[in-house]
Image: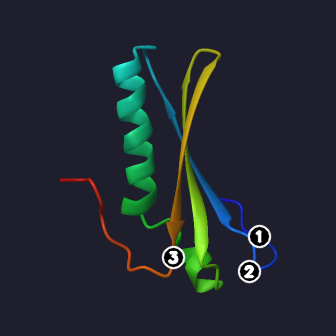
């Protein structure tokens, strides 16, 4: 987690996963799982308690030396809920 010094900047939360294959379906599923994990585990609570209104969740998946990234912007002002985990 990267917590900015001032409230005008967004915080950053990074969730890293490792893949045993480089199949795009598996990578895409792991990227989505990592973003969902950021919300489900409520990692942004610390940002919210410090007054930050927004954060960027970054999912990173490694396979060997290959890296895939996916990001999503979130607001800490909205109630925390589990989205897309049904």
What color scheme is it? rainbow
**Of pointers 3 and 1, the one earlier in the residue sequence:** 1
- Pinpoint residue 40: horizontal percent, then vertical percent: 36, 61
Q: Quadrant of the N terminus?
A: bottom right
In terms of image quadrants, where is residue 67? Answer: top right
Which x, y percent locates residue 4? 77, 70
Q: Secondary structure at mark 2?
A: loop
| Left or right: 65 as drawn, with respect to 73 | right
Write down the quadrant of residue 2 in the picture: bottom right
How crowded pointer 2 is (Cα within 10 Å; few <14, some 14-19, many 20+) is rated as some
Residue name at image x 74 percent, y 71 percent: 9
User: In the rendered image, which residue does mark 3 sit on?
Assistant: 76
Q: Mark 2 to mark 1: distance in Å?
A: 7 Å
Foreground of the two, 26 or 77: 77
Alpha-carbon distance for marks 2 and 3?
A: 12 Å
Residue appearing at x 35%, y 33% in the figure: 29
Q: Residue at x 61, y 75 (%)?
A: 47
- Whichever of labels 2 and 3 marks the residue nearer the N terminus, that label is 2
In the rendered view, does 80 fall on the left or right side of 49? left
Residues at circles 3 and 1 in contact by the CB criterion of under 8 Å: no
Q: Which of the numbered marks, if any, corresponds to residue 7?
A: 2
The CA span between labels 3 and 1 is 14 Å
**Badge 1 element:** loop
Q: Residues within 10 Å of mark 3 (few under 14, many from 20)?
A: some
Mark 2 vs 1: CB contact within 8 A: yes
Q: Decide which of 17, 79 is in the foreground and name it.
A: 79
**Residue 4: which disc?**
1
């Amino acid at each position: 987690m990267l917590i900015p010094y001032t409230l005008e900047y967004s915080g950053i939360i990074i969730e890293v996963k490792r893949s045993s294959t480089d199949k795009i379906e598996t990578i895409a599923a792991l990227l989505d799982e990592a973003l969902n994990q950021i919300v489900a585990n409520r990692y942004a609570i610390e940002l919210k308690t410090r007054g930050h209104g927004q954060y960027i969740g970054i999912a990173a998946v490694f396979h060997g030396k290959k890296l895939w990234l996916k990001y999503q912007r979130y607001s800490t002002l909205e109630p925390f809920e589990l989205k897309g985990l049904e």
